[in-house]
Amino acid sequence: MKKRIPYIVLFVLLVGVEVVIALTQHDNFIRYYGGDIIVMWVLYCLVQAVLGGKNNHYIMNLILLAFAFAVEFLQKWGFADRFGIENHFLRVLIGTSFAAEDLWSYLAGTAAACLGVFIYSRIRKNRDEE
């Protein structure tokens, strides 16, 4: 449980940031790109909290990137419309429109998460060597 707590805290904070972005930012860079970058961190923290942070962090980030790409391509295919999903919340959650720019944002979010993992591992390694 001890390893899960930082991920849970980060997850809650990042979801809060996403909600603030969704409620306050309209038609601008932060809304369209920043939210998609941060959502990758949200997913990473959620998965690490559930799995206890005991997996390969880089591979987990790549799996989440593949998941995000799959969801985006399901949007292009018209998943919500094809399956008759009418609930507004589910349509927002699943998404209804494809944007290639989102793929770049997911990639940037994944790269930032991997960079964070790398920096944290170096700091921890240096601390353990002292």
Image (cartoon, rainbow, N blue to C red):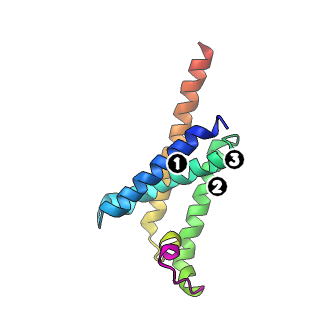
Q: Is residue 21 magenta?
A: no
> In the image, 104: left or right of 45?
left
Residue named by callout 1: 11
For the N terminus, the image quarter is top right
Q: Which residues are magenta?
A: 83-91
In this rendered view, identify the residue nearer to me: 49 or 63: 49
Q: Relative to residue 15, is residue 76 depicted above or below?
A: below
Q: Give the residue displayed 43% in from the left and 52% down from the top.
A: 16
Residue 31, position in %: x, y? Answer: 35, 61
Q: Which residue occupies the extreme top position in the image?
A: 130
Circles 3 and 1 in contact, beta carbons < 8 Å: no
Quadrant for residue 58, please give it: top right
In this rendered view, identify the residue nearer to me: 60 or 22: 22
Inter-mark Cα distance, 1 to 2: 18 Å
- Within 10 Å of disc 2 (Cα), the crowding (few <14, some 14-19, many 20+) is some
For the C terminus, the image quarter is top right
Inter-mark Cα distance, 2 to 3: 14 Å
Residue 23, position in %: x, y? Answer: 34, 63
Residue named by callout 3: 51
